[in-house]
Every structure is written in C-alpha cells, then in structure tokens.
Image (tube, grey):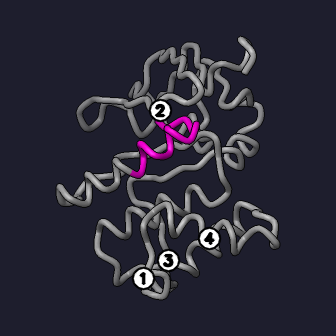
Amino acid sequence: MSAANEYAVETQGLTRRFGALVAVDHVDLHVRAGELFGFLGPNGAGKSTTLRMLCGILEPTEGQGTVLGIDLIRYPERVKSAIGYMSQKFSLYDDLTAEENLLFYSRVYMVPRPARAGRIAQMVRLADLSGQEKVRAGRLSGGYRQRLALACALVHDPRLVFLDEPTAGLDPVSRRNFWGLVRRLTESGATVL
C-alpha cells in the first residue's frame, strides 16, 4: 500500500449539525488500513452520527474526508458499495432464513451470480452459523442474529467494516464469540471501526 493510501479513513474537520445542535464537532481521523479502531463515549456523544457520515448515509455539515480513498461528500454511493456496515438495529429480514438473508444481501451488494453460493458458504463458516442456515432470522438467538448481521455486512468482501454497537444486549459468551470473529477479520487484513 502506498503512503498516499495507507489510511482507510481520513477526515478533517468533519462536523454535523442538526439545527442549533452540534452532534459532531470538527473530527479529525486517521485510521490505518488493517487497523481495529474503536470509538468510545457515552450515549449522545456523536459516535453513530460520525459512523453514518463515514458510511455515506448522512451528509456532513462541514469538513471533508475519504473512505478507502473515495471522497465521502462527492461520492457517497461509491462509499456505500465499497464498505460493510452493521448498524445498531441491523435490518435482518425475520421471515427469511439465515441463508436467504445472506442471498438477499449478496444480491444487494452485487456479488456476481457465479460467486454467490461460495461467498454465502464462506460467511456461514466465518460466522459459525453452520446448522442455522435454514432457521428464520426471527427465531435465532441474539448471538446468532448478530453474527448473521455481520455476515450480511461482509458478504461482498469489503476491505472496511463499520460496526455500530455490535454487541449491545448480548450475553458475555455471545459477546466473546462475536469479538473473536472481529479479530479474525482484522487478522485477514480488513479494517474495522
């Protein structure tokens, strides 16, 4: 990776206002490719708002930034297709099975048809979902739902993954298993925020 592209995320003065409320105030970030980077702060500190701006979902009020070298203000749709994003309330389709959710997201992220079955099988192994493929998402335990949500965010093999409070509400064992999965991602070279 060249010196110009050593950062997966760079921002200068990234700010978001909602009327008079300043939700994010001039954030400067430099997150190296392959790094596991965490935002810490109380509720209302602007963590989710910052992530939404970095994902191209929410336009910054001011400032600038790049995600995987893509200008997040000029090309938010390119950012969205290049990253994986797991929101606080990830929208799994409860009436679809785990496998059907993965197929749906592989289509949304335009995984080529010949590669879909292989990518889905890889995600089932990575997220340790074996034996859960035919279970409707609405019937999965919290831990399995979170792993499936992450697998859906990864099905297109993004180099950068944004996780917004991915273990909130999980029991300690499920939380440990989930973070083990995240560590495997970073060991494989992905950048995780």
Q: Is residue 158 left or right of residue 132?
A: right
Q: Is residue 32 above or below residue 127?
A: above
Pointer 3 or 4: first along the chain: 3
Q: Which residue is mark 2?
A: 50
User: Circle 4 is placed at which residue position?
Assistant: 120
Secondary structure, mark 1, is loop
Bin the neighbour count of mark 1 within 10 Å (Cα to Cα): few under 14, some 14-19, many 20 and up: few
Q: Residues within 10 Å of mark 2 (few under 14, many from 20)?
A: many
Kindly report which numbered mark, 3 or 4, lies closer to the viewer in this rendering. Answer: 4
For marks 1 and 3, give the CA distance: 18 Å
In the rendered image, residue 145, in percent from the top left (x then y), is placed at 38, 69
Q: Is residue 110 magenta?
A: no
Magenta region, residue range: 181-193
Q: Is residue 191 magenta?
A: yes
Q: Position of residue 172 (x, y in %)?
A: 17, 55
N-term mark: 2 or 4: 2
Badge 4 vs badge 1, beta-carbon distance below 8 Å: no
Q: Which is more N-terminal, label 3 or label 1?
A: 3
Say which residue appears at 67% left-offset and 57% top-offset: 156
4 or 1: tag closer to the N-terminus? 4
| Sequence-first tag of 2 and 3 | 2
Dot 3 and dot 4 residues touching (CB under 8 Å): no
The residue shown at (76%, 31%) is 74
Indicate which disc, 2 or 1, sits on the residue closer to the N terminus: 2
Residue 131 numbered mark, or none: 1
Q: Is residue 62 above or below residue 185?
A: above
Disc 2 to disc 1: CB gap under 8 Å: no
